[in-house]
């Protein structure tokens, strides 16, 4: 999951409870296809914060997004359009770096558990080699 957030301002001050709720459109950069179209952002009721939880991201795919902060075009915010790009690999990389690693000698499987759980972040692969630290291959 990727959470996209924006802080909206009017005359330089945070603003919430907008008349026209901000929307977001998300595109895959590899195909240009819109995967989310004009979805409503959630008003977090503090400091002009609005968010969208993008739950259908595919690891390894780059995305771009366009937020329309004033879809009714009544000048209720200082900046109407916000845009950016993201890639979910960053999240997976961060989670793997923080993961609890466990090598199961009975099965030869290396597990990357989400911190403090026994939920695998990736499918376990068989580890072979004479020395796991130096001569390791991952069977695909």
Image (cartoon, rainbow, N blue to C red):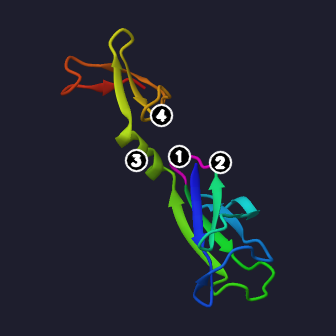
> In the visual, does 23 lie left or right of 99?
right
Residue at label 2? Answer: 56
Q: Nearer the viewer, residue 69 or 47?
A: 47
Magenta highlight range: 57-61
Residue at label 1? Answer: 59
Q: Is residue 29 visible?
A: no
Residue 30, x across and y down, in percent = 58, 58
Name the secondary structure under disc 2. Answer: loop
Residue at label 3? Answer: 94
What is the CA distance from the residue labelled 3 to the residue labelled 1?
13 Å
Q: Nearer the viewer, residue 13 or 37?
A: 13
What is the CA distance from the residue labelled 3 to the residue labelled 2?
19 Å
Q: Picture quarter containing residue 7?
A: bottom right
The crowding category of the residue bearing disc 2, from other C-alpha atoms within 10 Å (few below 14, some 14 to 19, many at least 20), is few
The residue shown at (25%, 19%) is 129
Residue at label 4? Answer: 121
> In the visual, does 124 lie left or right of 73?
left
- Figure check: 42 above or below 55: below
- Figure check: 37 above or below 81: above
What is the CA distance from the residue labelled 4 to the residue labelled 1?
12 Å
The residue shown at (80%, 76%) is 20
Tag shown at residue 35:
none
What is the CA distance from the residue labelled 1 to the residue labelled 2?
10 Å
Name the secondary structure under disc 3. Answer: helix
| Of the image marks 4 and 1, the number of the one nearer the N terminus | 1
Closer to the camera: disc 3 or disc 2? 3
- Figure check: 14 above or below 130: below
User: Is there CB contact under 8 Å for labels 4 and 3?
Assistant: no
């Amino acid at each position: 999951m990727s959470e996209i957030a924006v802080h909206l301002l009017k005359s330089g001050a945070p603003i919430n409870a907008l008349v026209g709720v901000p929307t977001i459109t998300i595109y895959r950069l590899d195909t240009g296809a819109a995967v989310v179209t004009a979805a409503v952002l959630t008003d977090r009721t503090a400091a002009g914060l609005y968010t969208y939880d993008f739950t259908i991201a595919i690891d390894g795919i780059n995305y771009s997004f366009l937020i329309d902060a004033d879809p009714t075009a009544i000048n209720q915010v200082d900046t109407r359009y916000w845009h950016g790009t993201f890639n979910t690999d960053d999240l997976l990389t961060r989670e793997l770096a923080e993961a609890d690693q466990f090598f199961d000698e009975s099965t030869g499987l290396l597990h990357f558990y989400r911190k403090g759980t026994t939920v695998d972040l990736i499918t376990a692969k068989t580890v072979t080699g004479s020395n796991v630290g130096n001569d390791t291959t991952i069977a695909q």
